[in-house]
Image (cartoon, helix red, strand yellow):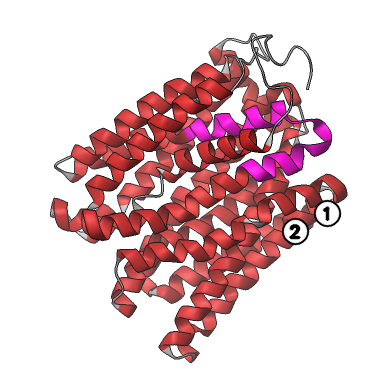
Amino acid sequence: MSAQSLSHNTEIHHLSRQTIFTLATGTGLSVATIYYNQPLLGLMAQDLQANVSSTGFVPTFTQIGYALGILLLVPLGDKFNRRYIILLKSLLLSLALLLCSLMPALEGLLLASLAIGILATMAQDIVPATAALAPAEHRGRTVGAVMTGLLTGILLSRVFSGMVGEYYGWRMMYQLAALSILLIGFRLWWLLPDFAADTKLSYPALLTSMAGLWKKYSALRRAAWSQGLLSVAFSAFWSTLAVMLHTDFQLGSAVAGAFGLAGAAGALAAPLAGAIADKQGPERVTQLGAALVALSFAAMFLLPLLPVNGQILLLVVSAIGFDLGVQAALIANQTLVYGLEPEARGRLNALLFTSVFIGMATGSALGSIALADFGWTGVISLATVAAIASLLVRLKAKSA
């Protein structure tokens, strides 16, 4: 960490466990706001008197908003003080969540969901801030620890929202989310130092420079493509799981949300993946992660051969496996990308995560179509093919 990278107005000279925990909590709570809707779609459809397929566009709009926010707003972290950006986004995100809870019709809910996705990118301001604060020799491990919060937030968001939705309604869930973001935003404002700008480029030049970074680094392109494909698989599963469990097993939103506990077990791999990437390089971790995702989804083709209890068990085991693989690959890809050009971390992060959430939005949309037209086998097929494609990208990189 260079002396110029932070202003003198800081009390943080190293990252304590408490600081890392707070950063992880901030990323988890902010990114969770784009996933609270998934177990709640049935409740939303009933409350707003909309059909299930139309309500399925709520997560799609949210993820499109997140991709837009990453592409258009996250690069500002290289130009402005990230501490101020995080505070402003937390205030606006809290407002968007509150407005979402008050919407009387699906059209308004879709617009509010788009805004939530855009502003939830405060998570992607916290992660580069962590990379800037961490010493280079421990960057993978430290970023991995904070990403544990982000990934746990993604998965446990479904558990929490499913339970709150079933007992108190989906609107209460969004009101609680608004309060949580407001509190963590002020906590981060108090904890973080001021960050000096890494570039003096104008905003148009900042965005234009991202095209140059994309052209310059083949490692960035491979990371974006491979993680984007894994995100297609990840989102196809999670965005359709609640509907499938309700249709095939007559299980409610609380059970659908509880599946997030299985996926959250995989989040424990994040610090380990970062540590391995620090020691052995990230390429190997990305290959192993993609292979595990493909194997976990392919195993679900055995579902029709099993009794009901066996099917539920296989879904749980597969969720643990593919979430572990996705998360390990993500940490490795981030470690790789952050090391390419330190003064452009915000823009590099934006490019990587734009691909991730384009993949998320694509997986959500294609997963809904696959479920409607081909059933759960269609969803599994989509996810398996996407994971194999990601592995091929990584294997091609090894042979190049």
| Quadrant assignment, res 174 | top left
Identify the residue under disc 2. Answer: 287
Q: Quadrant of the N terminus?
A: top right
Q: Residues within 10 Å of mark 2 (few under 14, many from 20)?
A: many
Could you tell which of marks 1 and 2 lies nearer the N-terminus?
A: 2
Residue 26 in picture, x, y percent from top left: 51, 36
**How packed is label 1: few (under 14 Cα within 10 Å), some, or many (20 or more)?**
few
**Horizontal and vertical percent for residue 130?**
66, 31
Residue 341 image position (x, y, % from top left) = 76, 27
Q: Residue at x 38, y 74 (%)?
A: 375
Three-letter residue code for mark 2: Gln
Residue 266 in percent (x, y) is at 60, 60
CB atoms of marks 1 and 2 within 8 Å: yes
Q: Is residue 253 above or below residue 363?
A: below
Q: Which mark is residue 398?
A: 1
Up-down relation of residue 361 to residue 264 (above or below): above
Q: Secondary structure at mark 2?
A: helix
Q: Is residue 142 magenta?
A: yes
Residue in the image at 28% along x and 40% along y = 175
- The magenta stretch spans which residues? 121-146
